[in-house]
Amino acid sequence: MGIQDYGFLEDLQVEFKDYDATNGVFLCFWFYLNKASTLPSTILLQNHSDVTSHAPFLLLDEKKRLLLYPLLTSWREDVYATSESEFSTKKWVHVGCEVTENLLRLYLDGEIVGEKSLTSSLNNDSVSDSSEISFPCISGKGSQLDGYVYSAELLPVVSSIKNHYVKDPPVQLSIDSSSAHEIEEDTDGVWSIVGGKASCRRNFSLDVTLMDNFSRPITEEVEVVASLVYADDEAPVEKPVDDEAPLLTNYDGIEYASSDRPSKVISGRASFKLKISQLSSKCDNRLFCIRFEIPKMGNYPFLEVFSRPIRCISRNRNTRAASLMLRKSSLGIHLLNGSQSPILEDGSSDLPCIVREAKQSPSSKRVKLGQEKLCANFKDDFVLQQANGESKSHSWISEDNYAYLNSLVARPVSHGGAQNFSSDSENSETTNSGIDDFPSNRDPISDVDVFKYCLGDLNERRLLLKEMAMSAKEEELATFAERISLFSGCSHHRHQISISKRLIEVGIKCWNLISDDNHHVLWENLVSGLQEHFLKMTFGHTRSLTYQDFDLLRRVSGCQDLVSQDNFEKVWCWLYPIAFTLSQQCITSLWGSAPPVWIEGFITKEEAESSLRGQDPGTFILRFPTSRSWPHPDSGNLVATYVGSDYTIHHRLVSLDFIYSSGAKGMTIKPIQDMLLEQPELRRLGRIVRSQ
């Protein structure tokens, strides 16, 4: 990877031996500014052999702007080319310097950001001839900046600056927050992870990426080491005497100290499944961080990355026990703030607002990392029983399409590529079972299963529903959903349980058709197969998926050109609940192709926030949260991202439970567009500004 080309700023020295500088100096390099404690500060200094004083060549001023000075024996402090924007820290930036007798030009990432003409700025007696220009030694020695340099080079012509920018970019280690599983975020922004003794601590997953500056994965295989440190001073968390290491990793079912089992970077990505054995309460309530680094490549800040602050807690079983006491048959539980609101006889709620926001209070429920603090409460969207014994979902299956869905949910023929419908995000302690291994005579709604689901984490629930979906009938799953609602004290799990059988069976059939009994398929083949199934699942009433939609699906799957079954399942568990939502009559119009398009496509939280910056209060965008996958109760739900009256961006859940329950009772409801615009916070539909 050419790690020898990376170096400290203070070690950079540019000499003009055998360099024809009569037509100007064209110097470029990649610069990583870790931190700037003293400003203004010189980045590069020019040392002239014929003068005793030294002049700056490149300087960072008090506003963190770059200033480029001419190479002259007589120079003026007010003559320089400067960038208008603040220089970025903690990331690689390509810097280009063009210095000629009459002109200064400053380049950032191949583009001109500052220019200064010298003919009118300098007196004629300052330099009467180009031969009198003193070409100094340019050096980073003495700089007070914590900076790093990569691939510094003197170029023959200015046109080479752009070529140098794209030729060989540097690399950087980063955390992929979208890959986080079983990590919760408290209201103070701190990650909350269940740890401690072996019987209580839980696995959590996190990926790091090693990519160049153009987000291209590095093909070389290197090892990344994870360690637990304190958040305040980055000092390693001490290992108790005769006890386990503070950070553990699971390998072939055995736990090891994370330092003993590094993870390899493959196609630019290293995946970690970790556990924390040390509790914050036993360390003076200090917060932790996880440091990922590549020791064999050197001690550079761009080759290490720190997680968010972590509070490691023990499992609190009292929380679940208390939730059992909240269940009342005549009450609906609003999970956002724990309050209770009566449900009227006609099925409607006494709260007409369909857009709700999580309350940030110490008693509010924590949510998984990467998601807005939102929760859905699906009250009545479950499988309805038919008089003839058949079961359908009133909001999913229409009479015209029931025959098609019946053909999709038929028992799949066993294929080698479809024996294991599991996700690589599952708990590493759990072994995957093939379809043929599922017992056909098991009781799908035993008390053991009910309590497993109520007390299990998301991965444990996923495994349980996968197994039950292969043997249980629709009406049995509906009964199971009712019992889960009873014993958990909350009804918002019903929806994901009710769709589990169709999700699993249709997903297996889809993978079999696309893979043709192969273990991997090309991404292009998966795209065409998903497009066809998406239109069928939405009955063709919605528009097709676009290139941008599939680009996000690719990020959800974490795959490259080749797609494994695990990659497919990640996509499917996210896409299927969305297709279910879009099949609803009240939602289909939001996705329609006629302008205005209320849901422009699949976008990330960051893209929505970026598109709303600078907009007027009340401007909003509808989106699907990217890291809510089945069987999470919020998967397939809509989120309204909007500009508040305080000009900050907020995120609220668009709760569909009132709409579903009203439709089940045969009530006439307003179009959802009108209901959204009735909310005081939502006034005008915004547009998506996609990055190229």
Image: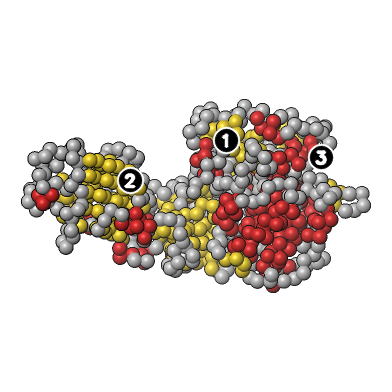
Residue occupying the far right of the picture: 388
Q: Nearer the viewer, residue 366 or 671?
A: 671
Q: Which residue is label 2 attached to?
A: 112
Position in image of residue 387 (x %, y %): 92, 49
Q: Which residue is label 3 attached to?
A: 664
Quadrant of the rendered image containing residue 406: bottom right
Using the rendered image of the protein, determine whether residue 290 is visible from the camera's viewpoint: no
Q: Nearer the viewer, residue 482 or 540?
A: 540
Q: Relative to 117, is 619 on the left or the right?
A: right
Q: Quick one: label 1 or label 3, which is nearer the N terminus? A: 3
What kind of residue is marked 3?
Ala
Numbered marks: total: 3
Rounded to the nearest angstrom, the CA distance separating label 2 from label 3 is 61 Å
Question: Residue at coordinates 83% horizontally, 53% vertically from top-left?
Answer: 402
- Secondary structure, mark 1, is loop
What kind of residue is marked 1?
Gly
Position in image of residue 54 (x %, y %): 13, 47
Q: How crowded is mark 1: few (under 14 residues within 10 Å), some or many (20 or more)?
A: many
Q: Nearer the viewer, residue 474 or 198?
A: 474
What kind of residue is marked 2?
Ile
Question: Residue at coordinates 46% horizontally, 49% vertically from top-left?
Answer: 308
Q: Which residue is label 1 attached to?
A: 686
Q: Quick one: label 2 or label 3, which is nearer the N terminus? A: 2
Question: Residue at coordinates 90% horizontally, 53% vertically from top-left?
Answer: 389
When the figure is inspected, residue 662 is found, relative to residue 262, above or below; the finding is above
